[in-house]
Amino acid sequence: ACILVTAPSNPACDLLCERLAALGVTTHEMLRLMAVMRDARHVPQAVLRYTRTDSVTGCFTVPLLDTLKSHRVIVSTCTTAAYIRSSLPKNEPAWFSHVIVDEAAQGIEAETLIPATLLASDGTICFAGDFKQLGPVIRSPVAIEYGLQTSLMERIVNKMSVNHSRVFTLLDTYRSHPSILLLYNKTVYAHVLKCCCPASSHDMEGWPECPRNAKGDIHPLIFHHCNGEESRSKDSPSWQNVSEGEVIKQYLMKLLAHDVKAEDIGIISPYHKQCQRLSYICKGEGLDVDVGTTELFQGREKRVILISTVRSRQEQQISNDLRFSLGFLGNFKR
């Protein structure tokens, strides 16, 4: 079998590569195909050994077609898979027996079609994802008008229906603590998800900051009120909140004091400007903490996630935000 494993984003592909490496897939068997312009400093060390680089420039390279075919598994983003497509001579058929598109519900339809074109005529393609979560990020009003905010995966499932024999609904979840799962299981999934999290999902219950309910049960889920103020600079339309940044820093220090490693912490904000501020805070403390937008963390896992929402609105104010396309409350999936 020859397998092409793809996802819309580099972080998701890196995670897939790491998981496959942990299963014992060797560098001879697997290639992590990179875009030539990607900065190697942003690639995990465990993934780098599966890549190919130029000995002179140090930049990532695309191997020749024969070398590509020599690997049983190739991991790449959906768009980077276009390198493989363009390497094929005209009229030469694709050779992958299996094509897997992970986080397919987040991919733009056009980019998801790229790996699909690399499937052998008798091959099998698998779209894995959850279209109730983040969908494609589409900024063009024209593209939205023509329905490109709907992923190919969601379009196919809507056409076939969830009861089709080729659609498999996975209801067991292994990621979140029950208290976290309860939030979205009720509001999004009508309580159909079953919590099967391992013991490791409960290991933060010993943190003194975790709240308890009236019965004394520990819930590692904190909503922290911050009476700050959002602001924008002249050079960017994005928002930031200085006070929230300080609150995030306080929690970060408390977590580190509780022996939580910096690499086990992720910080998310829906606003790029706030992500920049939080990155500066982490670097100022000499900490290598992953900071990014919601899309960056899609498909990734961390022991602890800190979220800075930056802005909050009274119910009567939301309609004004929607008129001017501000915030993320107008998109249910976000």
Image (cartoon, grey):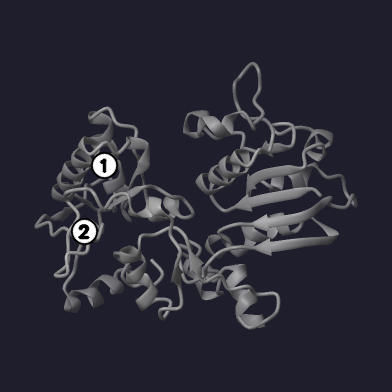
Q: What residue type is labelled 1?
A: Leu
Pointer 2: residues within 10 angstroms few (<14), some, or many (20+)? Answer: few
- Whether residue 261 is visible, yes or no, is yes
Asked whether residue 78 appears in the rendered view, the answer is: no
Q: Which residue lies under the disc numbered 1?
A: 278
Asked if residue 56 lies left or right of residue 69, the reply is left
Residue occupying image coordinates x 64% and y 51%: 6
- Helix or strand or loop: what does disc 1 sit on? helix
Identify which residue is drawn at 62% across, 43% down.
Answer: 20
Which of these two is toward me, 272 or 41?
A: 41
Instruction: Name the residue rendered at 22%, 60% in the picture.
Output: 218
How far apart are the alpha carbons under marks 2 and 1?
Answer: 19 Å
| Horizontal and vertical percent position of residue 11 | 50, 45
Query: 10 Å neighbourhood of mark 1: few (<14), some, or many (≥20)?
Result: many
**Looking at numbered disc 2 in the image, what kind of residue is underneath it?**
Ile
N-terminal label among 2 and 1: 2
- Label ID, residue 97: none
Residue on which disc 2 sits: 222
Q: Residue at x 73, y 43 (%)?
A: 73
The quadrant in which the C terminus is found is bottom left
x, y percent for residue 317 = 18, 74
Which residue is at the front of the view, 327 or 234?
327
98 above or below 83? below
Specify the quadrant of the image occupied by residue 102: bottom right
The location of residue 67, given as percent across then percent down, is 80, 33
Mark 2 or 1: the one toward you? 2
Nearest the viewer among 35 and 187 is: 187
Asked if the residue at tag 1 contacts the one at tag 2, i.e. Cβ–Cβ closer than 8 Å, the answer is: no
